[in-house]
Image (cartoon, rainbow, N blue to C red):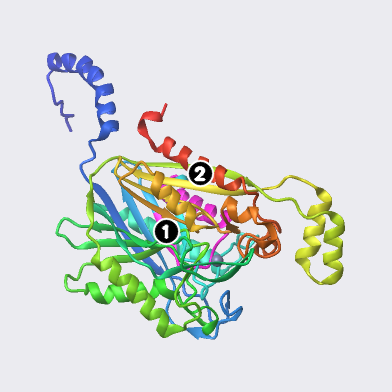
Amino acid sequence: MKRQVPFGKPLRALLVPLIAFLFPLAISAAEQSTVSTFLAAAAEVNITPEIGVRLTGPGEPSTGVADELFARVLVLSDRRQPVVIVTADLVGVEIAYAEAVGKAIEKKTGIPHGRVMFNCSHTHSGPGASLPADDSEKSYGRDVLEKVVAATADCVDRLEPARLRAGREAAQLGFNRRMPHGNNITMAPNPHGSVVPWVDVLGLYRKDGTRIAILFSYAAHPVVIHSASTLISADYPGFAVAHLQRMLGSGDGASRVLMFAQGCGGNVNAFPLKGGLKACSRTGLVLAQAVTRIFLEDVPPAPIRAASLTVHLPLQMAPPVKECERMLAESPDDQRLVELLQIAKEKKQRTMPYPIRGFAFGKTLCILSLPHESFCDYQLWADRESPYRDTLVFGYTGGVHAYVATARAYRMGLLGGYEASPRRSGLNSRYRTPPEPVAEQIIKGGITEVWRLLDPSSRP
Ligand SMILES: [Zn+2]
């Protein structure tokens, strides 16, 4: 077969230098934004564990299923490199697990793992997920990972043109749970304490107006069921999704995914604490109603950028060896104190990794993710300081190892309440001591640096 030649020789001779001249210009124009549309796809997979799995809320094995648990995936692209948001009805995962999910997604789809966010809803009626040391061993954590990777690959295959819209609506179903009592902080509703009093929403729409996905984010512990039931449940986020499904109807017959991302709810409980299943349905309804009230504004098509940065938070030193020995003598079977004594003897400066990630959609929208049980004060600060029109701040993303309180709370020492005191959650965490007050400054510096990395003009 004769090879077709598109141009005659003289014309080709003229075009070669012309193309060579235009090529660099074409690239810089694309960089500056000629993205004509976003692409998107979403999927959900059922990750309900076997009955009997231990639940954080009741602190005992589950006896049944109130509602199924899901992992949901949203893939967004500017036709160049996609970003992936995974939300899961899990109480938490380790940083190593979130990284393993990102790397498995990279291996399967080619999307760099730095462009994957893994958010846990922190439901106290669900399990965590981890990977066994042996690669071939079957486990719940591996099952969840494989389902999420397969769902992501499926989304990449199904990417379609999408309109992206963002909005915010007032909603308060959470209350600050740190109540000053004398010099101390106790765990009780504090009407004057900080909360994030809104729900953020992203909507992805097809050309015909049908929904591809709705992602909504609120910051509060899913503890409306907690110890009131030993049934597996996604708590208020799961009920909110179910109410939204019903409220939005299925008239258009098009597939859509509704997904919840947990914000920085480290010091916020959803109301009413331990209220049970019926109360949880009502709390979910309040959130779903807020989501349906939102007016969403267009996010113009633009390049999607991603930036990641892990800062390291210095951890407090253990008490002196003698004090640790005295505490251990009082409770000789307490393994936490055995470890604390060891830490005191080693006298090493230790740190906790704090991975921060950002996705920017042009100059309009930024999704910022923070790990661990970060206080809502970080979300409020990031929202205030953000250079973007719309800013979503996720907590519990990229790994959940411990609470991260404010400098002020850490400076209260033993009186700092459950989340900040070295003898309370600090001792419960794997590190056995909480971060130093300087952690707040380091985190804010890290967030600012992620914004700088996301800004195209700061790129080399
Ligand atoms: Zn928690």
Ligand 1 is found in the corner quadrant, namely bottom right
The circle on residue 184 is: none
The tally of labels here is 2
Q: Is residue 42 above or below residue 231?
A: above
Task: Please provide the residue range marked out in magenta.
Answer: 85-113
Q: Is residue 441 above or below residue 157?
A: above
Residue located beneath label 2 in the image: 444
In the current view of this chain or complex, which residue is farthest to the front? 182
Q: Quadrant of the C terminus?
A: top left
Q: Is residue 35 above or below residue 261?
A: above
Q: Position of residue 100 (x, y in %)?
A: 54, 54
Type of residue at label 1? Val
> Spatial distance from mark 1 to mark 2, Cα to Cα?
24 Å
Q: Is residue 277 above or below residue 271?
A: below
Sooner in the amino-acid sequence: mark 1 or mark 2: 1
Residue 104 or 415: which is nearer the viewer?
A: 415
Residue located beneath label 1 in the image: 86
Mark 1 C-beta to ligand 1 under 8 Å: no
